[in-house]
Structures are given as structure tokens and as C-alpha cells.
Image (spheres, rainbow, N blue to C red):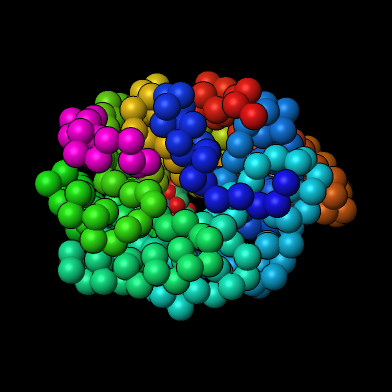
Amino acid sequence: MPLVTSTEMFKKAYEGGYAIGAFNVNNMEIIQGITEAAKECKSPVILQVSKGARAYANRTYLVKLVEAAEIETGLPIVLHLDHGDSFETCKSCIDDGFTSVMIDASSKPFEENIAITKQVVEYAHAHGVVVEAELGTLAGVEDEVNVSAEDSSYTRPEDVQEFVNRTGCDSLAIAIGTSHGAYKFKPGTKPQLRFDILEEVQKRLPGFPIVLHGSSSVPQDYVQMVNTYGGHMPDAIGVPEDQLREASKLAVCKINIDSDLRLAMTGTIRKYFHDHPGDFDPRQYLKPARANIKELVKHKIVDVLGSDNKI
Ligand code: G3H
Ligand code: 13P
Ligand code: ZN
């Protein structure tokens, strides 16, 4: 099966009360870990590439690696641009074979967000590609953009119908209390996503797929592993997984996870070097990192997203 768009995936996910995991990819081992997990769990999956990842790997490698994963696994895979910052970036990904793009003009004024999203939608739809847009702003760091907690803002439900109708976007990312990166909430606090906003958005856009960014849960065993073996991650907790499961049963059809994969990979490699100080063959330390990414993604698919056994 060639790479697919998310249209059918989201329709089934919405109706079935589960969500599709959208995992960020930067290299071969990450792509293999995620797709091997998805294959074992019989789960559809979205592999997403940020502008930074594309700059790191160059514009060809990640597309070809994702195509290789599709050939190896036979899975329905969406290749998605994460946080496209301009029409040009989105166009370039569409021209390269991405099946889905995000245009993130959420930091721009409402009318400007609509205008740029509409421009991307017109080009994307003419090429059989779907578009995710965003309303509301998340706190945290993505690429060079760092949004402080004070500058972040929840999505206003009263804006969503007009935005979707005027832009023609295929899915909408909303801000309900998640944030990017590994430092989301202080330990000892009780994070609570704004389900009232999600429910209000769902009422105004029945059947329309909603996206949650910043949905890592920051597994404490990996934070500890990083710190035990020489790292210095400040104490922090992530989005509670039971709240993500709850959101998946509502209109949320796509859940973005990057930081958790980074923690699993980095913790594993730090421990490996502590245990094997003399090794210098990259395959030896990338192999357990890949295996732990696979286990983590299996856990997300089965226990958080509910997308197992859906193909
Ligand atoms: O939301 C952003 C993702 O975590 C990607 O991060 O821009 O550092 O690749 P990146
Ligand atoms: P996390 O930093 O919580 O993993 O969020 C990733 C994300 O939203 C990618 O777009
Ligand atoms: Zn994001």
C-alpha cells in the first residue's frame, strides 16, 4: 500500500473512539522502532517530520526511509509535515511526496491565519494532500520558536466553525493545556486538560477530527535513567495518560508525541555507555534505543491511543 492520507484513518478513529499516534521521526532507528511497534499492534500510524528534522536529515532521506518502512511493514502510513511555518515549506513537502501537511500560523492574527491556511489548503487539495491547521497557541519550544506560558492561549470555541469553514482545512489542532517539550508541569501539581473546551469544540464541529500537540507524558523511568547516567533533566511531569485516553474517546483523532521518544532514546544510550564504556560501534547502542522506542510506542498504541487491532 502506498503512503496514505489521514482521511479514512480519522473517520474510523472518530467513530471508534480512539486516536492515531503521530510520532516525530529524525532517523532510521526511530522510524523502525515506531513502525515495528505499529505492525505488531496492527495499528495505523502517522510519521511526522518537523522543519528542523527535514533540515537535519535533508529533504530526501526521511521521505525515502518512511517509504522503506511502508514497504517493509505494509502498514497504512501517513507522512506528515509537523508545524509547517509557511506556504513554501508546505509546498515543498507536498512536492516531495508528503501525504499530509500542517500549516501552523497559530501565532498570527486570526485573519492572517485564515489567509495562509487557505492558500496551503488550495495547493494541497489540488495535489491530493490533506491539511492540519491550528487555532490557539501552545507553550513550549518547537524549532527556533519558543512560546512562553504567558504568551500561550487556549483555543476559543466560538472561532472554530468560522475558521474551518473559511479555510477548508481537514483537521484542527487546538490548545487545551498541553505544551511542547519535556518540561510541562511541576512535579506535585495535578495537570488537568480543559475538556470543557474540547467538548465545546466538538459540539460546534460534529464529526471533525481534532489534533492534540504536546502530548508526551514524560515517563519518569526514562527521566531517571537520563539523570542516573550523567544527564541533568529538571524535574517535570507530562500529560497524564488517562486524560489522553479520555480525549481519544472524544473528537481527538491525532495525538502528537516526540519528547517521550527522545527521552527513551537518550536514556537508553546514556545507560548503554555507562554499562559498556569501551564500545564504539553505533549499532551496539542504537539497537537497544530502537528496541525501547518500539516498547514505548506499543504502550502508547495499546494503553493510551486505543488504535491497536484497527487494520
Ligand atoms: O513540536 C515540535 C516537535 O517536537 C518537533 O521538534 O522542531 O525540534 O524537531 P523539532
Ligand atoms: P511533545 O513535546 O509533548 O512530545 O509534543 C510533540 C508535538 O506536539 C509535535 O508536534
Ligand atoms: Zn506540535
Q: Position of residue 22 (x, y in %)?
A: 52, 44
Judged left or right of residue 22, residue 2 is: right
Residue 205 part of the magenta segment? yes
Task: Report the front residue among 136 and 151.
Answer: 136
Task: Report the front residue among 244 and 147.
Answer: 244
Q: Position of residue 133 (x, y in %)?
A: 35, 57
Residue 161 part of the magenta segment? no
Extreme front residue here? 126
Judged left or right of residue 224, residue 87 is: left
Q: Residue at x 72, y 33 (%)?
A: 39
The reply to whether residue 153 is in sight is: no
Judged left or right of residue 271, residue 104 is: left
Q: Position of residue 5 (x, y in %)?
A: 55, 50
Question: The magenta stretch spans which residues?
Answer: 195-210
Quadrant of the rendering where the C terminus is positioned: top right
Q: Taken as a whole, is the magenta stretch helix, strand or loop?
A: helix
Task: Report the front residue among 265 and 88.
Answer: 88
Q: Is residue 138 above or below residue 129?
A: above
